[in-house]
Amino acid sequence: MPFGLTNAPTIFMDLMNRIFRPYLDRFVVVFIDDILIYSRNESEHAEHLRMVLQILREKKLFAKFSKSEFWLHEVGFLGHVVSGDGIRVDPSKILAIVNWKPPKDVSEVRSFLGLAGYYRRFVEGFSMIASPMTKLLQKNVKFDWTEECQLSFEKLKERLTKAPVLVQPESGKEFVIYSDASSIGLGCVLMQEGKVVAYAS
């Protein structure tokens, strides 16, 4: 596919999703031309790797060996670090949030919340913490960066730097959901065997 076509990434992503559909969310994650293969053990991984490479061969798609990494116990992928222990935020990506200066207008608030929101499943009570800043995004609200907004901003940054490692859910094991509600928001945590799978709010 030629470079520079406006919709080339979308078309290629659709192709990759179609050819790997039987394996998506079972042991393959695809993002444009990045393919992540995950497994529970080495023998299973060898089989998964063989299956993926076979599909690439059948579809006449090529993986550049110099850009490929194999048999990793930990991998950075889409702003996360994935390992046998679970998923955590990529410290290099969080650095951008930590170094973010207080917003000076609504557009900067929206940008900050967009980036921080990408990691919201790692932060308990994200929407409640972000509430003072979120109110600034409403129509007909004058931008006024109050002390409450500043505290919200700092607390979100702190929570993201101390975000937990989220475990991958395992089928066949019991889940527990804890929920909470107040006048400013709803929140819940999905857990398995006492470990956090994800926060939602």
Image: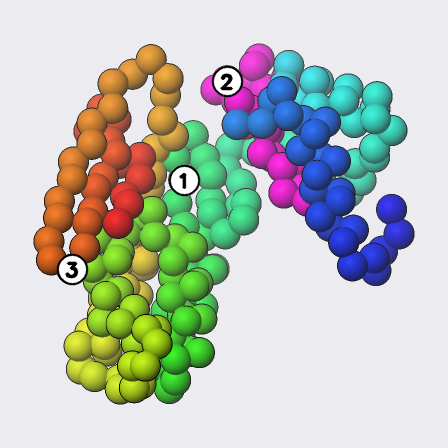
Asked whether residue 61 is drawn in magenta, I would say: no
At which x and y percent is residue 64? 80, 40
The residue located at (32%, 81%) in the rendering is 140
> As shown in the figure, which amino acid type bears the numbered disc 3?
Ile
Q: What stretch is highlighted in magenta?
A: 26-46
- Residue 190 occupies quadrant: top left
Task: State the residue position of label 3.
Answer: 184
The residue located at (72%, 27%) in the rendering is 19
At which x and y percent is residue 27? 55, 24
At which x and y percent is residue 98? 37, 69
Say which label, 1 or 3, has the lower sequence index. Answer: 1
- Spatial CA span between label 1 and label 3: 29 Å
Front-lying residue, 38 or 174? 174
Q: Quick one: SS at disc 3?
A: loop
- Spatial CA span between label 2 and label 1: 17 Å
Indicate whether 32 appears above or below 59.
Answer: below
Q: Report the coloring of the rendering.
A: rainbow
The residue located at (29%, 16%) in the rendering is 173
Task: State the residue position of label 1.
Answer: 87
